[in-house]
Image (cartoon, grey):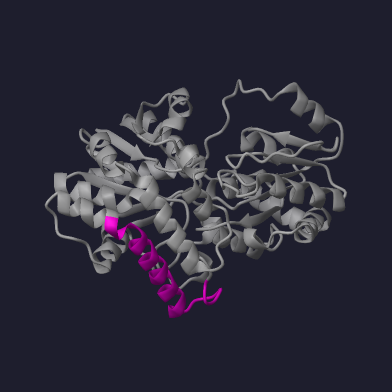
Amino acid sequence: MKIVILAYGSRGDVQPAVALGQGLQSVGFDITIGAGTDFESFITDAGLPFAQFNANMQDLVNSEAGKNWLGGQSKNGLEEITSMRRALLDMSGHVTDDVLCLTNDADVIISGLPLFPVAETIAEKFDKRHINMQFMPLNPTKHGSATPRFPVSRGETILNKVAGYVSQMALYWVFTDLLNDFRTELGLSKWSFGDYAYAYNQKVQILYGVSPQVIGTPSDWNDTQHITGYWFYDAPSDWQPSDALCDFLNNGQAPIYIGFGSMSSQDPEKTANIMIDALTQSNQRGIIYSGWAGLQAHDLPDDIFLLDGVPHDWLFPQMAGVIHHGGAGTTSAGIRAGVPSTIVWHMGDQPYWGRRIHELGIGSEPIARANLSVDKLAKAINKMTTSSQMQRQAQELGARICQEDGIGNAVRIVQQILSE
């Protein structure tokens, strides 16, 4: 049985899809991963066939539309979702044609969030099976611990569920033009929000590559929603860091990691200088990850190392704390490492992960990227490096996460779904 996994997005979207693909391949499924052109070597090095979307994701993120969306400068949720809609329309290009081509001979489609409605449309038109993969809770629930964005209450209330539907309505609005043009092209009726919500909440099986110890399992979800545990893809056993990085790590106290991953920046050097000044103010060594934003800083102090890229599973356990943008993948890596985290959120699901990290007692209060300052960042660093309770709770949760088998659980669920 051939399964095509559509991993349209950044490294945080592609890496767990590769981990899932390897797990499914190991039990006999014929797997292909569809991703942007800049992920070809990453996917093929993992031993999986690659099929490309005709887009370079790093270039798209660093385009003007990408920076407006991902730069973390939106003043409110409406401005953010509007920027997201504009960016995705600019980025979409011929994405529906790409998906049609990639899934032509597939028996099963596993889609990520951006392509959920497109994949479901293809499954409907051509009688294919469709499973969705998610890395943050998006099905409405009364439970505040699993309510998208900000909950009305940390406990249980119907208002949290309403907030979940509002989040889904916003996503529907983002994709509706692209989706309904595509459905019309295939001779299908247009979707209303009710159609979208029914498919998302009742019809399509959803695999959540997230730990139940982090979000809990909402009692008001149904049997189409499955929380499996995280899908980790670790560095190859023969991977080796640079001598310069090893020398830095071996010649001083454990540093603080700071990096915003694939989030673009309107002013990378200003951002880097905030990081440097905060580390200096808190008297901590640091590792700054340049990322897709191309962060740069001239004349770095000797106790700060500028990093181009390194596997999180190797680096994070050696840190005194990690500060990042709050992407689901980076968040999970920080939790598993057993060290305190602070999230500087830019958009999307990142405020949610920032809140959960703080609520779990394993990190400082989240900081909105638009409000980032030297003083706020230094305060977070000081809290992570001085709170023995936070350090202990982070270590204990990390140890429990290491005992989970998210990939094994996901593979068993897929086998069960496809056997029905």
Q: Is residue 247 left or right of residue 401?
A: right
Q: Is residue 367 magenta?
A: no
Q: Quadrant of residue 237?
A: top right
Most common SS among magenta residues: helix
How many numbered discs? Answer: 0
Of 88 and 110, nearer the camera is 88
Q: From the top left corner, tell me how far across and down residue 257 is, in percent.
A: 72, 44
Q: Is residue 294 left or right of residue 170?
A: right
Q: Is residue 148 visible?
A: no
Of 2 and 84, nearer the camera is 84
Q: From the top left corner, tell me how far across and down residue 32 is, in percent.
A: 33, 31
Q: Residue furthest left?
A: 187
Q: Is residue 217 left or right of residue 92?
A: right
Q: Is residue 189 above or below residue 248?
A: below
Q: From the top left corner, tell me how far across and down residue 130 is, in percent.
A: 26, 47
Q: Quadrant of residue 171?
A: bottom left
At a point 74% along the width and 39% down the height, the residue shown is 297
Q: Is residue 261 visible?
A: yes
At a point 41% along the width and 31% down the height, the residue shown is 37
> Which span of residues is magenta-colored?
151-177
Q: Is residue 166 magenta?
A: yes
At a point 62% along the width and 23% down the height, the residue shown is 239
Q: In which quadrant of the rendered image does the N terminus lie?
A: top left
Q: Residue furthest front?
A: 64
Q: Is residue 388 above or below residue 40?
A: below
At a point 45% along the width and 66% down the height, the residue shown is 218
Q: From the top left corner, tell me how far across and down residue 70 is, in percent.
A: 53, 52
Q: Is residue 399 left or right of residue 187?
A: right
